[in-house]
Amino acid sequence: MGATILSHDRELEGLEIREAGTRVYVPFMYDLGGRVKDIAGLRNTLIDVYGAVEIDQAATRSWNLSYLAVHTPVLRFRLPDGTAQLASSEWRYKRILKVFPWLGILSIDYEFESEQAEMKILAFYDELVKWKNADYLPYLQECDVFTDELAAHTAFASQAPAQDLHASLVRQLRVLARPYIHSRPALYAFHDFRVCVIDYGSTLDANVVQCLLWLTVPDTDNNELEHVASIRYGSVKIASTGWSTVLRTNTQTADSEVTKIVSLLSLIHAQWFICQLWINIYDQDVRATDNIDSALRVHELSAGELSLERDLVEVGNLNVMLKDPELLRVARSLERSFAVLEHRKAAEQRLHVLQDHSRDLTEFARERATRRLEILFSLSAAGTIAALGSAVGLVDSV
């Protein structure tokens, strides 16, 4: 997965020395619709529409060249900056859009920063969810996946989007990419996002860090949270529950280290998301097409199985990609926190059921074809006998 990610987010390297403070990195993963088959065509189209589109260059010290040789580089371009009012503070954000061609995934990565000294960082997550859902829920309606059940859970009924953060961009990108991709059996419309708090200067209290990791604030009667173990990469201390990650570092030396860690987090997130995507495609695809002609269905299922198996090959063996022991240690730690391998097993279970279903349909189609041949043979034989009977009758009458 993601041969070129280690050099992404160069905007995070904007200053050689970071001032002390807290930033929040939030990547939103979306399904592009399928693997990119024509990267040059897609890139040229994106340049025509959005302007400058970069190709990420890989860190060859850390990646196996045999892996890089067969994986198309990530495409990326800068989106307009903006501001958001979250938890009584104004947050400025920068955005980068990335396309992972070999997986058919796009990611819109936000980096939030507040200049206010009194940030309510523990309220940031819940405020972020409310803020992005004003864009996300109308988008789900546009994609025709906003079910009655989801409406009941969210108490959301409005058709008009309260704001357009990036939903219209995602829909536009899917249309632009359609001629250049091998489409999957179905589109997974939902997104997945994670939160990574970057604490430059290690200014956050240890109890606050644990609250950020568990995305909760303990009540006064029980103010203890399960401790999340941390590892180090250079001068950066890393702790993660998968859904939330906290990086704590000095302000003087850690920018390149933070960039590499964030890149690995993006890698692990994309691996998790491709599994999530296929789990949901399987559930939707089997239900929606049970009444299709079995012969056609067998062909579609076989194509789906091949795509699913090919994507799952990209998940779960970091040694195929990386040759840097320290980065491998960080990647494996994040992989455990995200429970990527468990998610891969869930996708594999769908694949096994899909294969069994395909075999059953193949056998059913074979039996039906055999019965049709038997019926046709019987009808042909009956016709022949009837014709012979008529001929004998004519001879007798002469």
Image: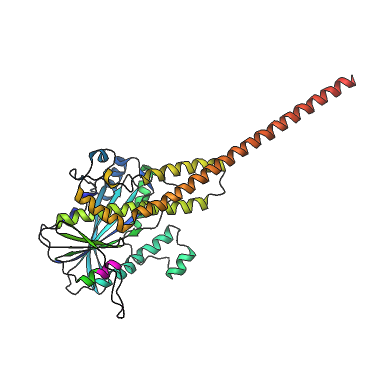
Give the vertical position of 65 relative to 284 (above or below): above
Q: Tell me if residue 213 can be seen.
A: yes
Q: Tell me if residue 7 can be seen.
A: no
Q: Which residues are magenta?
A: 210-222
Q: Is residue 322 magenta?
A: no
In the rendered picture of this protein, how many numbered marks are placed on residues?
Answer: 0
Residue 36: where, in percent of width, then height? 34, 43
Give the vertical position of 118 relative to 241 (above or below): below
Residue 357: where, in percent of width, then height? 52, 46
By what rule are the colours in the image chosen?
rainbow
Q: Residue furthest bottom?
A: 221
- For the C terminus, the image quarter is top right
In the image, is 74 to the left or to the right of 294?
left
In the image, is 302 to the left or to the right of 104?
right
Residue 326: where, in percent of width, then height? 19, 51
Give the vertical position of 374 relative to 202 (above or below): above
* Along the line of sight, the residue nearer the viewer: 319 or 283: 319
Residue 369, quarter of the rendered image = top right
Residue 180: where, in percent of width, then height? 36, 42
Residue 233, quarter of the rendered image = bottom left
Q: Is residue 213 magenta?
A: yes
Q: Main secondary structure of the magenta part?
A: loop
